[in-house]
Amino acid sequence: MMETKSANPFEEVNSKAFLEALVGGGAKAQKAFAELFGATHERILNYVRRYLGSVDECQEVLQETYLAVHKGISKFESKSKLTTWIYSLAYHKTCDRMSEKDRNHLEFNEERMALATGESTPSALFDDISPWDMASDAVAEKRRLEGLISQAIESLPLALRHVYQLRDEEGLSGEEIAVMLGMPSSTVRVHLHRARNQIVQSVQEKLTRKAFKAPEDFKTKSQSAEVVKP
């Protein structure tokens, strides 16, 4: 990966040397673009899949995103990371597609079900239990909790869900999200705090209504949720 030192390919493309190669033209630029796609497309596709349920739509938005990257790279001013800019393009392409279809497409899996605290996943609550040793009620409890968390994330207002998923699931910094969504960092913090709290409240309310005892670890983390800087 073109004279870069990072062990993370996704971050390697943010180097000055890589960007210079990307905008330099000729075979070197073509090679750099291929490397850019290889290093970033899986994460961008996973992000798009959170909102678009159709595989074909996701692939189309991915293609539109990288076409926009190819057309716009010469005008990229390095005011943000290159990867943040690509996320931003994917975000706008996804919003455009959702608007055209007038519906929300949602696809969740266990890897994307981060808890409201952003510190652990539903499966992490049961890491000390071997799948072979788990009693049937523990398995059912785990799956039920995961489902409630998934529903809570899905029910968030779109603005809060975007911030929550970009921060707690994609791992972007608050500053990157602010640039990407065009909002102040303070607004990102407020949105993230509200999203986390709403997820916690939604899950706790449903657990209470259904007389379902939440794992102690989840209740402890939920009850101690505070404003966390992205």
Image (cartoon, helix red, strand yellow):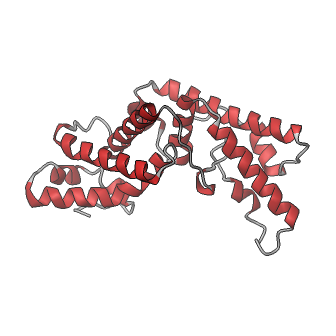
Q: Is residue 128 above or below residue 47?
A: below
Quadrant placement of the N terminus: bottom left
Of residues 65 and 118, the one drawn nearer to the viewer in this rendering: 65
Q: Residue at x 18, y 37 (%)?
A: 75
Q: Can residue 224 be seen in this snapshot?
A: no
Residue closest to the far front: 101
Most extreme residue toward the right is 211
* Left or right of residue 64: residue 152: right
Residue in view at x 66 percent, y 52 percent = 120
Q: Residue 3: where, in percent of width, then height?
A: 23, 62
Q: What count of labels does the image hold?
A: 0
Residue nearer the viewer, 164 or 54: 54
State whether residue 198 is above or below residue 18.
above
Quadrant in the rendering for residue 94: top left
Q: Position of residue 201 (x, y in %)?
A: 76, 33
Q: Residue at x 56, y 38 (%)?
A: 164
Q: Say which residue appears at 28% left-offset and 48% top-offset.
A: 66
